[in-house]
Amino acid sequence: MAKSKAIIVIPDEKVMNKILLLRGKKIMIDMDLSELYGVETKRLNEQVKRNIKRFPGDFMFQLTKKEKEQIIKDYPHLENLKYSPKLPNAFTEQGVAMLSSVLNSDSAIEVNIKIIRIFTKIRQMLSTHKDILLKLEQIEKQTTNNSKDIQVIFRALKQSIEQPKEPEIPREPIGFKMPKK
């Protein structure tokens, strides 16, 4: 009998909660990645060190002490990092993609595909939000101009209401007049 392949199911939300914003980049911390891949953080970092040429500065960087303290404060799920004497590694989307070539198990490949799809989904959402924000900005400018026009109309209406009425002069009726007999 053939072995049944275990399918790893990781909810999108779990992965999304592990994507952080640091140095203006969306990143994932080595501890979170190792949890998703089902390996020890130490082993993940060993593989990265063995293949360090695959991880330039825009794919992976080490956090500073200050950044480590900040993410521990901002993200409660990283609280265990405060007990680690080492500074964690941060992987950008490209770094996560490169991990697939370093970690070569079936489960790591599945998890990696899931993570990359979520990064792509986030990028698409941000793009959509930018379009919406631009449209809102255009509408805001239009309403600002319209509100100025509306204010002018209201002032004119107020002035016409507030102006003192001139006494009415009796007028002769217009139209056909019957001759008097």
Image: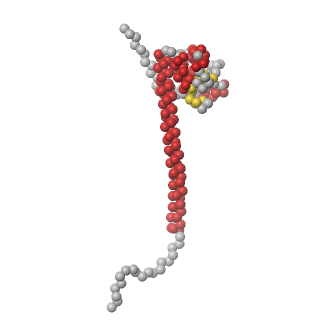
Is any atom of residue 78 visible in this view? no
Residue 158, position in %: x, y? 52, 64
Q: Residue furthest front?
A: 53
Residue at position x 41%, y 14% in the image: 5
Residue 26, picture quadrant: top right
Q: Position of residue 12 (x, y in %)?
A: 47, 27
- What's the residue at 59%, 14% (across, down)? 50
Is 164 or 103 nearer to us in this picture? 103
Q: Residue furthest left?
A: 181
In the rendered image, residue 98, in percent from the top left (x then y), is placed at 54, 21
Which residue corresponds to the image point at 61% horizontal and 23% vertical from the top-left?
56
Q: Quadrant of the N terminus?
A: top left
Q: Quadrant of residue 92?
A: top right
Q: Position of residue 177 (x, y in %)?
A: 36, 84
Q: Is residue 135 above or below residue 32?
A: below
Q: In the image as oriented, which residue stretches furthest toward the right?
A: 65
